[in-house]
Amino acid sequence: MVAKLQAEDDETQRSTPLVEIGQRFADRYMPEALLGRGGMGAVYRVRDLDLDEVVALKLLEVPDTTSDAIERFRREVRLARRVTHRNTARTYDLGEHRGFRFLTMEFVAGESLRELQSKRRIELGKILDIARQIAEGLAAAHAAQVVHRDLKPANVLVEPGGRAVITDFGIARGVQGSDATLQTHGTLGTPAYMAPEQLAGERVSAASDVYSLGLIVHELLTGELPFKRATTMETALARLHATPPDLSTSHDLEPGLAALVGLMLSREIAERPGAADVAVAIAEQQAELEALRASEGSLSSPTPIRRLALAVLPFLHRGSSATAYIGEALGDELIDLLAMTKGLRVSGSGATARYAERRDRDPRAIGRELGVEALVDGTVHVAGERVRISARLLDGETGFQRWSGRFEGALSDVFELQDKMGKRIAEALRMEVEQSVHRGDATPEAVEHYLRARQLARVWAFKGPDGAVARLQQCLALAPSFKPAMAAYADACLRAWFLPREPDEPDEPDYRAMAEAAVEAALGWAPELAETHLASARWSTQAGDYRGAAQSLQLALSIAPTYAAAHAYIGQLQVEGGRPREGLDHLELGLELDPSHLFCLPAIARYHALRDDLDSFDRVIARFYANEHRPTDVPVRTLELRVGAWKGERARIDAAAAELPKLLPPGSPLHEFHALLWLEEVAADALVARVERMLPTVPNPHFRGSMLQIACEAAMIHAYPELALRWLALAGEGPLADLDWLEHCAVLAPLRSEPLYRQNLATARARAEAIWWR
């Protein structure tokens, strides 16, 4: 009887609406609106009263807690939480209320792609932008070894600002999951957007999601799915044997885009590109489309990108006839490198050969003769064993000089010199050409703010009323559509966020929020710029999304192969993440392309120090100090202090300790924190107090992790292994993926048998391996 009454009471509760608008739910959420209802339940917009944030709440309206539906729900949470990317909806928590399970996730204020399709035909530029973002979101999921399995237009939301977000990883399954034969809630996936292997009941992989994306892109481009038949199921089954039509002929689509869609829709799984490769290819298509529109005078974009026509004149030679070939070879090298840069149309050497012997080079006349807007001219002067190269960028219409540079090197290895100088000149030219191509209606005052911000960024002056962030804000206020400034602003906000708070600035701006908004804006408005994708990579590392960072860097280097900052950043990731030889090559290349990227040097030096090669360490550090224009010595002095502490070299410790106080602001918590490495004795409570005073001044998770690594070292140096493990665990809770430090830092040796150390090492290794997982 009691059981009967209890059952009736349960039934009464379940017959009462669980979620009522305006009535508190589960003691924490205030429902504001019903967003939609599906086979598994309903989705509401609710306010999280604990955090005062709007989130989406998905209620599973099946009370049987032992059913397949509940198991599917649990799996949704476990897998979806692995994926963190701006183009995937973040999953927060799983809860239970009155016998019903619910899920909270990021609220995306937008329409589904299905709704957008039903309202109007989406223009090509928007299709490519949405498709690229979906591909980037899938790449992040696949890096976390998660397959969506039900990608379709209804599961993609598009915000008014343009961000596309993949939702409902509800039937996602880990690539290495053990439930390979599990069927949940009927057929896994939606037949209209299933891959052939999925329809055939075979193993589903990341390539299946790529096929589904291919179907979505095909439908967006043509208005219908391929293999059109009388019913949805017949259309789906046709994929098992039919070949998709060539869109370049059937719908007059650009051949490169048509070929990409064809590869995505290949029945052969091995022929389909990875999601990251799809994103790169679509970004290239976007750049080409905008260049074409500019040449046709399209008004569809507020500041359309155009392809600048440029010619490289044969460099004039001064010196022995035996070295005359250097100028010709250098010109060919520049043509090849510049031709790979998006937004440029570069004339071949055959078109400019007739100017080789001409000394009276009027840039205006040559510009008219060649039909180009800009010219690269220069001289090669060989004297003894030295080669000096001067290069200029000239305006083909006015004849004015836009840029000039001088480069010098030894003649001993002329081929290496040609390669290095060619890349350095090409990168310098790329920056100037990019500014010219994208300048649009930017006023001289706006450009002045932009150029000043670039100078400030080189010396790490990002904060304050006259810092790079403020300068770029002024630039964008005057020229809101100046794309290079958008990308530079995103990068400046990120780097300002990375720096610790100063003692006299307790209420500094929320650089994290500014960075997030700026990166999102740059990705939406300037995806064709390499600088945008470097900023995106920096953002990804803060969330521990190293694979996302690597993908963004791949995009950056596909757009601009000579982009020095991207080489420097991916080099640092590789050295720390288990690929040191490749990383060192990228770091050295970054320095060759732009010698002002001096912070490549401490990354190289640390690699040598961790392997007890202090001679190489000292040589690299000497290269840093030899540069009179180095921005700040703080990171290098800190590294010298750490290395001295690792090795117990008192002279090295004392030398660094004498200089660091001169470089830090008075009262800086970092000063007393760094002192933990040079003081000969520190009590445990004093050690803890200094670390705890320092941490609140470091809001950036990546920099905070670096400080915790130093704290761990200090604890070991002063023989407090329990404190070292505590701070190592804290670092592991953040985005720590520094395998090189964990595996090679000498002071950590006594910890390597500890379970907590091994756990953090395994976590870092998994993160590092995810960077390169394909």
Image (cartoon, grey):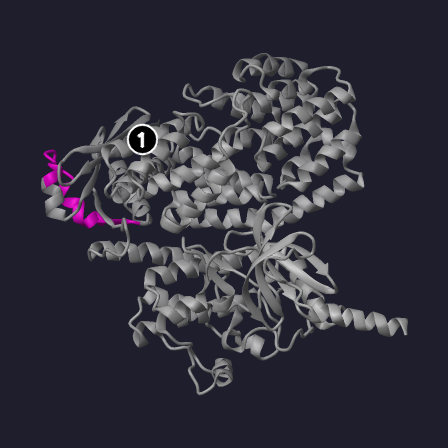
Closer-to-camera residue (577/618): 577
Q: Position of residue 29 (x, y in %)?
A: 64, 54
Residue at coordinates 57% horizontally, 69% vertically from top-left? 37
Start and end of the magenta stretch? 343-364
Residue 22 at least partly seen: yes
User: Looking at this rendering, what residue extends furthest in the bottom direction?
Assistant: 230
Q: Position of residue 451 (x, y in %)?
A: 32, 31
Mark 1 is surrounded, within 10 Å at the Cα level, by few (under 14), some (14 to 19) or many (20 or more) other residues, namely many
Task: Tell me if 364 is positioned left or right of 552 in this view.
Answer: left
Q: Quadrant of the C terminus?
A: bottom right
Say which amino acid is labelled 1: His
Q: Quadrant of residue 356?
A: top left
Closer-to-camera residue (275/491): 491
Residue bearing the label numbered 1: 449
Task: Tell me if 310 is positioned left or right of 196 in this view.
Answer: left
Residue at coordinates 62% horizontally, 41% vertically from top-left? 735
Task: Name above or below for residue 269 compared with residue 140.
Answer: below
User: Looking at this rendering, what residue extends furthest in the right direction?
Assistant: 1
Task: Name above or below for residue 129 compared with residue 749.
Answer: below
Residue 82 at least partly seen: no
Q: Secondary structure at mark 1?
A: helix
Q: Position of residue 683 (x, y in %)?
A: 77, 18
Q: Is-magenta flag for residue 504?
A: no
Residue at coordinates 42% horizontally, 18% vertically from top-left? 628
